Amino acid sequence: MSFELPKLPYSPDALEPFISAKTIEFHYGKHHQTYVTKLNGMIQGTQFENAALEDIVCQATGGVFNNGAQVWNHTFFWESFSARRNTAPTGDLLGLIERDFGSFDEFKAKFADAAINLFGSGWAWFTMKPDNSLAIVQTGNAGNPLREGQVPLLTCDVWEHAYYLDYQNRRPDYLAAFWNLVDWDLVASRLP
């Protein structure tokens, strides 16, 4: 089996002014594509040659894990955005956020803090744990909460290539812009 770079669910300029078409060109078109290409080269002739991407994320190690998880993480990241602006969750998702974080504003503050203060490169995740509680999780490099049995609901890529063209070293500004793009209906659909 060979993996392909998935199509974006919107045009490359649809996320402007928050994420530029230039960032999409490099982050999606070059970085994400490179992970796909490297993964395909690494799995040939291995136990992962015909594996699902989730199996690679949960079972692989080394370069196969790193590239496989980055393919999964980036795909999940891009799918979380919408050109239409629905800047807050509703319904069951909002109720769960209020149950576990007190308010949507408190959730946003804690998630932004996790993303802004993650040392180095990695990801901030909003997840559901096996006990059905919601959590905010930081992972370094290609880390993914699937390996811990958690259900990812939303992620923010805080590798510098995700924001440097638009925000330079201003990760907090990138996080402020991030909230304008989240497709909360899609995030809600990821609840188990």
Image (spheres, rainbow, N blue to C red):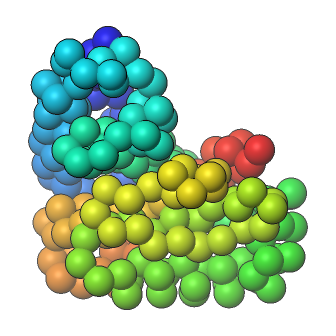
Residue at position x 37%, y 52% in the image: 15
Which is nearer the eye, 31 or 86?
Answer: 31
Q: In screen coordinates, is 16 left or right of 94?
A: left
Q: Relative to residue 120, is residue 185 depicted above or below?
A: above
The quadrant of the image that shows the N terminus is top left
On the image, the x and y values in percent for residue 16 come to 32, 56
Q: For residue 97, say whether it is visible.
A: yes
Residue at position x 33%, y 22% in the image: 47
Q: In screen coordinates, is 142 left or right of 182?
A: left
Q: Determine which quarter of the picture holds residue 173.
A: bottom left
On the image, the x and y values in percent for residue 154 come to 55, 57
Q: Determine which quarter of the picture holds residue 39.
A: top left
Q: For residue 18, say whether it is visible.
A: no
The quadrant of the image that shows the C terminus is top right
Residue at position x 59%, y 73% in the image: 136
Q: How many marks?
A: 0
Q: Relative to residue 183, is residue 11 depicted above or below?
A: above
